[in-house]
Image (tube, grey):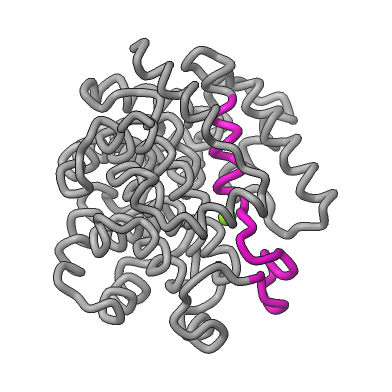
Amino acid sequence: MTESLDRALGALYGLAAGDALGMPTQTLSRRRVVELFGALDGFRAGPPENEVSAGLPAGHVTDDTDQAVIVAELLVEGGGRVDPDAFAARLLAWQERIVAAGSGDLLGPSTLRALRLVAEGASAGTTGRWGDTNGAAMRVTPLGVAMPATDLDRLCASVGDLDRLTHDTTVANAGACAVAAVVSAGIDGATYTEAMPAGLLAAEWGGRLGHHVAGADVRRRIGWALDLTRGATDDELLDLVDGLVGTSVATQESVPAAFAVAAAAPHDPWRATLLAARLGGDSDTIAAMAGAMVGACTGLSALPPAPVDTVRRVNALRFETLASALLALRSRT
Ligand SMILES: [Mg+2]
């Protein structure tokens, strides 16, 4: 396996493993996560009290992985460009499938609002005007695999294009550009620490793309969260991220949270995702973003084989073909 394929697979399986680890803990308080799961050390089933994930088996992924796969497939089909009409149709079809399966894991607030506007006939370029939550950052990883970070301006512009349908705002673009840039730098061989300047710069540039919405500066909050948690023990880290950085679906909380948790385990994607899953709140998305970023910077070879096998088997995931196709797009550009 080439180094870049190992890293592309690290990003995608890191994302899926983090998503599945956070599946049972999402929406719960940090205190409740400890009561139910102790020091979480692997995949667990969705507990009955979890309104989103009750009944899902251990290792099951959620919207984060499903929608990243949709983005990956559309990028490949579109030769590196995601067609917004196809994107809307694919997201709606996904939601119908999820509803039919009886899952409570539905489209997030920004995507749902945008697709309602699409259905009402709103003109292109207006539907994502208020989308500021973390759906854009949670599903952007395939774009980071498909595009090099050497031309950061171009990478950020492509993120802005992808986000226009549902998350066409300064806050959402800042978060998605930051995640995409770290993933992309990782594919090119950067360590997580080495990828950080690109992530911060991309957050700054992304923060100028799309409609302005009020919200704290994502780039500055990432830097602050990294400073705040540097040198912390695991429990101190989780307390700081839970209590100060924030774990909600707000981009300006969950993206800095993912960066801080990833920085605590920059060479160990499994440990980064376990830490993130213990947070509660939007822990599946935070763990998915942390797993994608660290996984891209270490490669699949740094993930333990057993959980990767589990997440592949439970969800019938086969990322090998997708990763190769995304890398083929990357080498073209
Ligand atoms: Mg989710």
Viewer-proximal residue among 224 and 103? 103
x and y, in percent, of residue 168 in the image = 46, 33
Q: Residue furthest front?
A: 1
Residue 176 lies, with reference to residue 82, above or below; the image says: below
Identify the residue at image location x=52%, y=33%. Answer: 320
x and y, in percent, of residue 196 in the image = 19, 45
Residue 153 within the magenta-colored segment of the rendering: no
Tell me the quarter of the image containing the N terminus.
top left
x and y, in percent, of residue 111 in the image = 60, 41
Identify the residue at image location x=58%, y=26%. Answer: 73
Residue 201 lies, with reference to residue 101, above or below; the image says: above
Viewer-proximal residue among 165 and 183? 183
Q: Main secondary structure of the magenta part?
A: loop
| Left or right position of 110 against 256 | right
Viewer-proximal residue among 295 and 235? 295
Identify the residue at image location x=79%, y=43%. Answer: 97
Residue 50 within the magenta-colored segment of the rendering: yes
Identify the residue at image location x=47%, y=30%. Answer: 323
Provide the residue span drawn in magenta.
45-73
Q: Residue furthest bottom?
A: 35
x and y, in percent, of residue 18 in the image = 47, 57
